[in-house]
Image: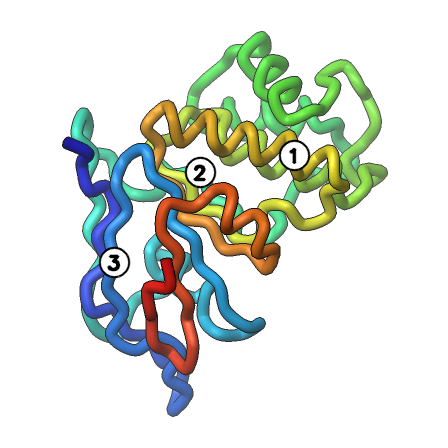
Amino acid sequence: MSVEIIQVENLSKAFGKNVVLNDLSFVCKEGEIIGFVGYNGCGKSVLFKCICGFFKPDGGCVRITFPDHAEGICGNAGIIIEEPAFLRNKSGFKNLDFLYRIRNKKDKEHIEQIMRQVGLDPHNHKHVGQYSLGMRQRLAIAQAIMENPKILILDEPMNGLDKRGVEEMRKLFLKLRDEGKAILLASHNREDIDMLCSHVYEIDNGRLSLIR
């Protein structure tokens, strides 16, 4: 039986008088991709930031359960919500290596393997500031998965990718799902949602409704 990794219960968030999230509840199990759709500004990113702990909810709660260890969400989640603040005058490899070392980890072969997994050449010395939008998005995905997190929280992860890149990342996310990851995915591309997600929720006027 799959473990419920992410449990969101009666979550609410407002900014002043603007109620963005109103009494939202759902769960995401291991080996599951849950999709979120809605118009720009409907609250998808706010929801993800509340789950990650970047925003404090005004009501309700988020519970994270790991079956094999008890790290907090930020210690065991790969997150793409906004474009990471990469060092633009360093290569993609050096960026990932620097971030990996911050967690007292050192494994250049692992970083090379992760970069290849997302379609980047680890031996390309081009600075990130010279990367295309699609290359930066691939690097963001590499950063999100490089520590083998149990949870992935992905807000528009296909941004800037060409058709081939989208197909490659879809295959990667399905592989990660099959490895038991719990994945939250927000996308404006309905094809991504239809192909990847076990269940789909729509956020509209602060409310959450299950549409599949």
Residue 182 occupies quadrant: top left
Q: Quadrant of residue 137?
A: top right
Look at the image and tell me whether residue 18 can be seen: yes
Residue, x 60% and y 27% (percent of image)?
A: 96
Report crowding for label 2: few under 14, some 14 to 19, many 20 or more residues within 10 A (C-alpha). Answer: many
Q: What amino acid is at disc 3?
A: Phe
Q: Quadrant of residue 26?
A: bottom left
> For mark 1, what is the residue?
167
What label does residue 26 carry, if any? 3
As helix, strand or loop, the secondary structure at mark 2 comes to strand
Circles 2 and 1, Cβ within 8 Å, touching? The answer is no
Residue 177 coordinates in the image, percent (x, y):
40, 31
In the image, residue 26 sits, relative to residue 73, either above or below, namely below
Q: Is residue 18 left or right of residue 120?
A: left
Mark 3, mark 1: which one is toward the viewer? 1
Compared to residue 126, the image places residue 207 above or below, namely: below
Residue underneath mark 2: 78
Which residue type does callout 2 highlight? Gly
Q: CA distance from mark 2 to mark 1?
A: 20 Å
Residue at x 56%, y 47% (from the top left corner): 192
Q: Nearer the viewer, residue 37 or 94?
A: 37
Residue at image location 41% in from the left, 71% down from the top: 203
Residue visible at 24% across and 74% down?
23
Closer to viewer: mark 2 or mark 3:
3
Cα distance between the residues tagged 2 and 3: 20 Å
Label 3 sits on a secondary structure element that is strand
Quadrant of the image for the C terminus? bottom left
Can see residue 75? no
- Residue 41: image x %, image y %? 54, 74
